[in-house]
Amino acid sequence: MRTGALRIVVPPALLGVVALVLWQVVVVVGDIQPYLLPAPTAVFAQLHLVMPVLLTSTLATGSNALVGLIAGALAAIVVALIASRLSIADELVTPIVAAIAVIPIVALAPVLTTMYGATSETPRRLIVAIVVFVPVFVNTLRGLRQVLPVHRDLMRAYSASSWQISRTVTIPGALPYVFTGLNIASSLAVISAIVAEYFGGLQNGLGSRITSAAANSAYPRAYAYVLGAIVLGIVFYLATLALERAVSRRHR
């Protein structure tokens, strides 16, 4: 078990170390200015200095991403269940989802911030929910449609109700597709939460810190906040994978 874990962890870790070393060498040898590309040593030095602020900012952005992810995913799953059962709902919802998929965050964020006020976190959470809704809905609906008709016919021959068919056949068969959508949405939730912070509102998240540091020409500090955003995205993705494994073991 330990050998398998080492094989998974060690190669990416070594690759990351090599990339950092090459980054440092390129910056030093090429005499690259910080506004173009700061050295990793400067970034890690700033990371140590801003760690308390980084933690509070990561918590603020992470809470918005988590609330939006849960709300958007639940709404997408419910709508997909309805669309899979009612053809008229499918015909009505699918074009709307296609329209939602192309809504630009940069256009929607200022509007929602104006609507709800600069002191509310609701606009950012709504943006995350909207971004998350599309991949979860599309994958869930596809999974619900993958169930073979013979399986449903067999359950009906056993006098199973619609709920029993959904609980024992349809939903378990769609779980891999649901988690595929969630895996995609977990990263999108963090990205959209950070982007939403660029357009006003409370200055307490990673996106606000990045723009503020860049505006003040503190580029190593901006990269330190970017590193925090990367770690937050990885945490969300790993949490989704852990949830998928736990559910898969239970249904297996």
Image: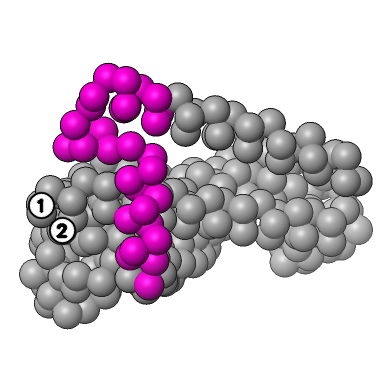
Is residue 138 shown left or right of residue 218? right
Residue 136 image offset from top left, x and y in percent: 50, 50
Is residue 191 shown left or right of residue 172? left
Magenta-drawn segment? 23-52
The foreground one among 113 and 138 is: 113
Residue 20 image offset from top left, x and y in percent: 47, 33
Residue 106 image offset from top left, x and y in percent: 16, 49
Q: Secondary structure at mark 1?
A: helix
Residue at 87% across, 53% down = 252
| Residue at which label 2 appears | 212
Residue 48 quadrant? bottom left
Could you tell me if the residues under marks 2 and 1 are in contact, i.e. CB atoms within 8 Å? yes
| Residue at which label 1 appears | 215
Residue at 12% across, 77% down = 117
Instruction: Measure the C-alpha gap from mark 2 to mark 1.
Output: 5 Å
Residue 185 image offset from top left, x and y in percent: 48, 50
The 10 Å Cα crowd at callout 1, few under 14, some 14 to 19, many 20 or more, is few
Membership of 34 in magenta stretch? yes
The foreground one among 149 and 10 is: 10
Residue type at numbered disc 2: Ser
Q: Give the answer, above or below, for where 109 lies relative to 105.
A: below
Is residue 219 shown left or right of residue 66? left
The 10 Å Cα crowd at callout 2, few under 14, some 14 to 19, many 20 or more, is some
Residue type at numbered disc 1: Ala
Residue at 45% across, 62% down = 69
The foreground one among 175 and 211 is: 211
